[in-house]
Amino acid sequence: MRLDLWLLRPVAGLLDDDCEVGGNPFEEYWDCAHGFVVWAASEGGARRVAATACGDERRRAWLDSRWSTCERLTGAGRSGVVLRDFCRG
């Protein structure tokens, strides 16, 4: 089975301080994962892998495309950081 790298992130705007989306799993900013890069054979597999490593945002945040994006990473691209999951405190 061929595995690919996948980048999972919260949907744009969900981590913003002024986000008022009902049921937002990232509302409690602390103790939540804010992104993953995982190995998996498919998008569904990538979402399941991320869901097993979740924090207080709970599994649904990574399993449901309303809350998170899941993008296959290809060998094409430019030099740079893939994921910097930084929280300034």
Image (cartoon, rainbow, N blue to C red):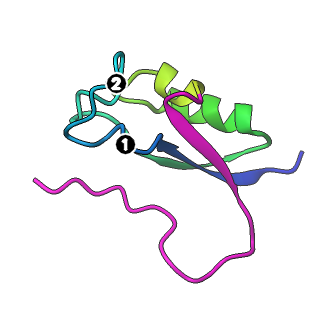
Which residue is depicted at the point 35% across and 55% down?
85
Q: Which residues are magenta?
A: 65-89
Quadrant housing residue 46? top right
How far apart are the alpha carbons under marks 2 and 1? 9 Å
Q: Position of residue 48 (x, y in %)?
A: 63, 28
Rendered view: 1 above or below 76: above
Rendered view: 13 above or below 54: below
Residue 72 among those drawn in magenta: yes
Name the kind of residue labelled 2 in the image.
Val
**Residue that protrudes farthest toward the bottom in the picture:** 79
User: Magenta residues: mostly which secondary structure?
Assistant: loop
Pick the quarter of the image with the N terminus.
top right
Quadrant housing residue 8? top right
**Residue that protrudes farthest toward the right in the picture:** 1
Within 10 Å of the Cα at label 2, are there few (<14), some (14-19), or many (20+) other Cα atoms?
Answer: few
Q: Position of residue 11 (x, y in %)?
A: 47, 40
Q: Which mark is residue 13?
A: 1
**Marks 2 and 1, the one that precedes in the sequence:** 1
Disc 1 on helix, strand or loop? loop
Name the kind of residue labelled 1 in the image.
Gly
Quadrant housing residue 18? top left
Q: Are the residues flagged by discs 2 and 1 in contact, CB closer than 8 Å?
A: yes
**Residue that protrudes farthest toward the top in the picture:** 23
Which residue is depicted at the point 21% across and 35% down?
30
Please name whichever residue, 30 or 1, is drawn nearer the observer in this view of the structure. Answer: 30
Q: Position of residue 15 (x, y in %)?
A: 31, 41
Q: Look at mark 2 in the image and give the residue it sits on.
A: 21
